[in-house]
Image (tube, rainbow, N blue to C red):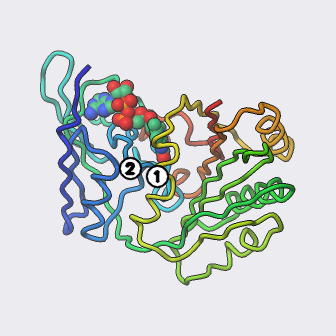
Amino acid sequence: MIDLSRMRDVRADREKRIATCHGGATWLDFDTATQAHGLVTPGGVVGSTGVTGLTLGGGIGHLTAQYGLTCDNLIAAELVTPAGENVRASDDQNPELLWGLRGGGGNFGVVARAEFRLHPLERVVGGRLEYEGEGVAEALRLFRELAIDGPRELSMQAQLTTNASLAPQLVVVPCYTGEGEDPEVLRPLRTVPGLVNDGVRRQGFLEQQRIFDPGYGVDRNYWKGHFVAELPDRLIDDLIGRMTAINRPPGGILIESLHGAPKDVDPVSAALGYRDAAFNVSDNR
Ligand SMILES: Cc1cc2nc3c(=O)[nH]c(=O)nc-3n(C[C@H](O)[C@H](O)[C@H](O)COP(=O)(O)OP(=O)(O)OC[C@H]3O[C@@H](n4cnc5c(N)ncnc54)[C@H](O)[C@@H]3O)c2cc1C
């Protein structure tokens, strides 16, 4: 075990729009440092998660549709290899190693430092939309349609759970970075029957990053991802049926959309294996 938790420095270069991040930094460290300059990299949605491990696995979050996967924004890294050598991976030096780090996991050495492309962003329209009962299935279908046809200014995740009486519950978390306080594209989700709480508003990106905190950041579970090419009605009905049939809260199914920017990136630029998928359906049962 190599503990990097004291190597957490993150520096943002506002001019070059590059962040340099040490191997043990978390997303809370990263977002705090980069938002001080009004800049972001698309990362994970829970502040306690490590930047490097998440990047090496791909990285899906609130800005995936806008700016791509986290690994697509990795532009260089410094590694210590198993032989004890210091190696730099970038487009110019060891490019095949950079390819491997983009989605190939923690197999190539210890990443001591990583460099990320930054994008200007301070405020988003985001928050939680909560649904219960019969409206859950319709809201989940709307979520699917929006993910397929929606603009790339909109990233979205949906979390399916049950309440204390084992009825289905759905939380949809949009993150919209276009113009306006009340985007038209979100209206259907904000008016569908079954909506019991609308927490969507214009807010700072750091607030958006706290939506799932502490949530599954504290209640750690064994999550399993399933990348699917589509989310047909039958799968939606099955997911809701299984959630209620298992009869064992808490727990949940997280559905992350992979539309937008990830599809712009040339697949040969990364070792990542799931770029073509439409959704990641993760469960922690
Ligand atoms: C609470 C929680 C929330 C999550 N949210 C998201 C999310 O929003 N989006 C998403 O895409 N994924 C998410 N995940 C999954 C996450 O991507 C993986 O769990 C990821 O492995 C976390 O990285 P870590 O560094 O924290 O974990 P670790 O378990 O420490 O590392 C994972 C792997 O990466 C390797 N590794 C870590 N650091 C380095 C390094 N510096 N150099 C070389 N190898 C290294 C480790 O050896 C291990 O093989 C979440 C996981 C949790 C537990």
Q: Please rate how many residues cluster around mark 2, counting C-alpha atoms within 10 Å: few if below 14, some from 14 to 19, many from 20.
A: many
Q: Position of residue 142 (x, y in %)?
A: 77, 61
Q: Specify the amino acid type for callout 2.
A: Gly
Q: Which residue, as the protein is rendered here, is positioned at the far bottom?
A: 180
Which is more N-terminal, label 1 or label 2?
A: 2
Q: Residue at x 42, y 38 (%)?
A: 270
Q: Secondary structure at mark 1?
A: loop
Q: Are marks 2 and 1 in contact (CB under 8 Å)?
A: yes
Is 62 situated left or right of 108 in this image?
right
Say which quadrant the C terminus sits in. top right
Q: Which residue, as the protein is rendered here, is positioned at the far front?
A: 164
Q: Position of residue 110 (x, y in %)?
A: 24, 28
Q: Quadrant of residue 104?
A: top left
Relative depth, front residue between 225 and 223: 223
State whether residue 278 appears in this view: yes
Q: Please give the residue where the numbered disc 1 appears in the rendered image.
A: 213
Q: Please give the residue where the numbered disc 2 appears in the rendered image.
A: 47
Relative depth, front residue between 240 and 108: 240
